[in-house]
Image (cartoon, rainbow, N blue to C red):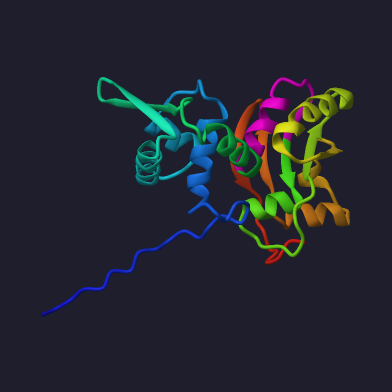
Amino acid sequence: MNSTIRFVEKSPAPTLLPILRSRQQGEILAWLLDDPDRETSLAELSQRLRVPISSVHREIKRAEQAGLIVSRRVGQTKLVRANRQSRFMAPLRQLLVMSFGVPDRLAWALADVPGVLSAYIFGSWAARYRDVPGIRPIGDVDLLVLGDPDRGEVYSRVTEAEPELGYPIQVTFRPGDWLETGVDSFHDTIVNRPLIQICGDGERVRNNSAASTASVAH
């Protein structure tokens, strides 16, 4: 009898929260549970999070079976949202927001601040988000803000976001074209390590990273 062995590629557990199966699972659940009133189609979820539609279908099916989300159909379209009645809703939401919701929360915080041309998360949190291992636990979230905003307004907005994110936010300001024109050692460090763009050109951007050459992030 002939037998066939099939090898299935498996995504590694996410460094930020390794109890989950994959980062895709964490991102999908975080986006849905963060706002219980948020309802979306699977196609929109795939496009927004840049996750393959097959992965979205798989994770949504599992989450629905676990009672974490509910769904309804409008014509041929399946709409999904968080299940407010789930006993796991509150504690799981807190874990997911701390682990995967930081980019969206900070994007919302800066969305309408005049003078913010773009903003990026860098440092240890960004590295772990990109699954770059490190030897020290994450103590804060480093935020790079480019442009010429009112700094007091930026500090006020990110301070409001800190309690649910579970981390202090350390903000660094630089001119709008600094990524292209900077020449100091800090600039070289930033552009050669994981960098997550959270906003730019007036709209939120998810999961856009600069090239990373670091194999281990401290």
Looking at the picture, tell me which residue is in the foreground, 77 or 213: 77
Where is residue 107 shown, x and y percent of the image?
Answer: 67, 30
Question: The N terminus lies in which quarter of the figure?
Answer: bottom left
Residue 111 sits inside the magenta stretch: yes
For the point 67% across and 63% down, the residue is 133
For the point 85% across and 53% down, the residue is 186
Q: Magenta residues?
A: 100-118
Question: The C terminus lies in which quarter of the figure?
Answer: bottom right
For the point 53% across and 34% down, the residue is 31
Residue 58 is left or right of residue 159, and the answer is left
Asked whether residue 119 appears in the rendered view, the answer is yes
Where is residue 211 shown, x and y percent of the image?
Answer: 65, 56
Residue 115 sits inside the magenta stretch: yes
| Placement of 79 over or under 135, stated as above or below | above
For the point 88% across and 54% down, the residue is 184
> Residue placed farthest to the bottom in the image?
1
Q: In the picture, residue 41 is in which quadrant? A: top left
Asked whether residue 200 appears in the rendered view, the answer is no
Looking at the picture, tell me which residue is in the foreground, 59 or 183: 59
| Placement of 132 over or under 154, stated as above or below | below
Where is residue 63 shown, x and y percent of the image?
Answer: 41, 39
Residue 186 is left or right of residue 96, and the answer is right
| Placement of 170 over or under 90, stated as above or below | below
Q: How many labels does the image show?
A: 0
> Residue placed farthest to the left in the image?
1
Where is residue 179 shown, x and y percent of the image?
Answer: 77, 45
